[in-house]
Amino acid sequence: MGSDDKTGVEQGVATAASAGNKQTPGRSLTRGEWLALAGVLIGTLLTFASTFAFGWVYDDPPQIPQNQNLQWGKIGFLFTHQLWASVTGIQGRFYRPLLTLWFLVNKSMFGLNPHWFHVTSVLAHVAATALAFLVARELLRNAEAALFAAATFGLHPLQAESASWISSANDPLAAIFCFSSFLLYRRAKSSEGHRAGWWALAGILFLLALLTKEVSVVLPGIVLVDLWADSRRDLDSRAFGRPAVAAVATYGAAGAVWFVFRWWVMGGAATAQLALPWSTVLLSAPKIVLFNLYRVVWPTGLSPQYDFRLIASPGPELFLFLFILLVLAGLALVAARLDRRLWTAFAWLALPMLPTLNLRWMNQHDFIHDRYMYMSMLGVGLLAGSAYAWTTKRWPSMRVVRLLAWAVVVMLAFASAIQSEYWANDVILFARGVQIAPANEWAQLNYGSALSARGKFADAAPHFVQSYELAPGWRAADFAGFAFQQAGDLPRAERWFATALQLNPTLANAWFGLGQISLAQHKAEDAITYFQKALTIQPDAEGYYYALGNAFEQLSRPADAVKEYQRELQLYPSQIGARRALERLQSVSSK
């Protein structure tokens, strides 16, 4: 095929490729480059377009449709409380008010229609992909390589979780702010005028990123690595000194504002979730990093949960992982010495992984998620783009190199489209989790919960039992008790509720479940005791006073039953059962 047969897109990227490293910083995109970028972005949009038909999944219901605080009248509450403040009993580890604001804006525009939430989530990912292209173009000085980098970032299957799950919209949103801040820092560094304004904008965007997701805290480190790499490449110490001072001042000020405000909002509530020894955290870090890199290179068998066990003491496994990591670090060092720009790519890859290595803030055995790699995928894209630029520059006449590269992009897109389908609903998602990670208690627990939500209690109960056997905890026992109760197996339900209460005596619903079981077994006195304990813990729970009234009726104490029905109706005037029972008893007493 001759040059006359090329499309405008091909001509644009070919022209950029021929420019190679001579591309002028800040040069405007050509028409062909715009068309090529539009093609990548449209491809990214189409890859995840099937998610537009999906509903709420995983953490979406408590964060959005069930969140009573998600309204403009409580905007102050949203900015002065932790992310999960609307859900009772969840520790405050995350302060992400801009994520909640994103949900509120979507709710105001579309109501509680999850399909439009999915549309805006994918659009956020597309916007992050566009900015990934601009960052790559700024660093690689090669538009065609930058397109390949952006396509790798936007279409890699590891991005499917953040693009397909509404509650993970904070990943592309934080990336948008971080990538934009990085571009503005580069503008401030190279600009002849208005540097203070560019630095100020970079700092503001960094602050917005921090208010969206905590992983953004690594951005100043990436900026300093980029400054150092530039100064080493130019052999000019002044290229590092003054900009470094400006970067430290700008990002330090924004970070200090965020830290102080977060401390004021969270206070002592921002505590670690697990009492893991620091030795276990450190010994497990190489394994986690390698597992992340493995999924980058071979993104198959992806899942919402993984079977991942920590390393508690030194042994052959640890030494093998350390050896592999040292070999990879050595190869990275050699490559970065040949091309200083790779230091920035490696910084984008490695530094966003660091916060995810603090396992003490994670749930037990829930240490790995694909979304934790979202921002690191820019580093992967930059490395892919660098390899693409080097290969096409060395063998410019070999069109097969370009064809193979874009064939890889198409394969990534198909793999991502398939992976996104697992996020269609909870049952499909957590069936996948159980399939990939059957020994993960969260996978079993979540799958059981998904089945219970659809009324399949007999199918759900064994998964709760399996979750408890993998890691005994009150939550699995409580859910197992409820599932067995709804399935009609009252003896097993009673045993599991009792087990849950041994682990956590403050479970009002477990006491209530025991009361219902006793009532069904005509043990009214035991039922009254259980219901009263439940009401002591949760005095405003719907249905509790009504159930207590039933127990009093079973003991032939209608006057006490009337009082409980009246209390129920005071709290919930639309409670039909309590109203009918009260009318029935009052009609009997009037005769």
Image (tube, helix red, strand yellow):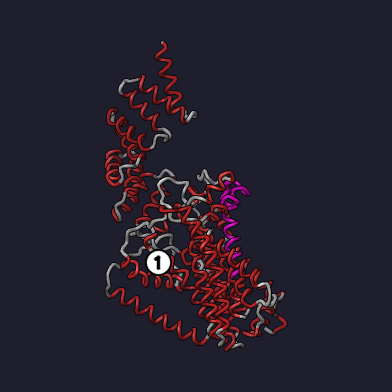
From which residue to which does the magenta span run?
Answer: 103-132
Instruction: Name the residue at 54% across, 74% down.
Output: 223
Instruction: Name the residue at 31% across, 51% down.
Output: 473
514 displayed left or right of 392: left
Q: Is residue 546 above or below residue 449?
A: above
Q: Quadrant of the C terminus?
A: top left
Q: Secondary structure at mark 1?
A: helix
**Res 112 visible:** yes
99 displayed left or right of 273: right
Q: Is residue 233 above or below residue 567?
A: below
Residue 440: x and y in percent read 35, 59
Give neighbour class at mark 1: few <14, some 14-19, many 20+ (Cα, 10 Å). some
Magenta stretch secondary structure, dominant: helix
Q: According to the image, label 1 marks what residue? A: 357
Residue 373: x and y in percent read 47, 67
Reply yes or no: does residue 125 show up in magenta. Answer: yes
Q: Is residue 354 above or below residue 440?
A: below
In which image quadrant can residue 155 be found? Answer: bottom right
Residue 285: x and y in percent read 37, 70
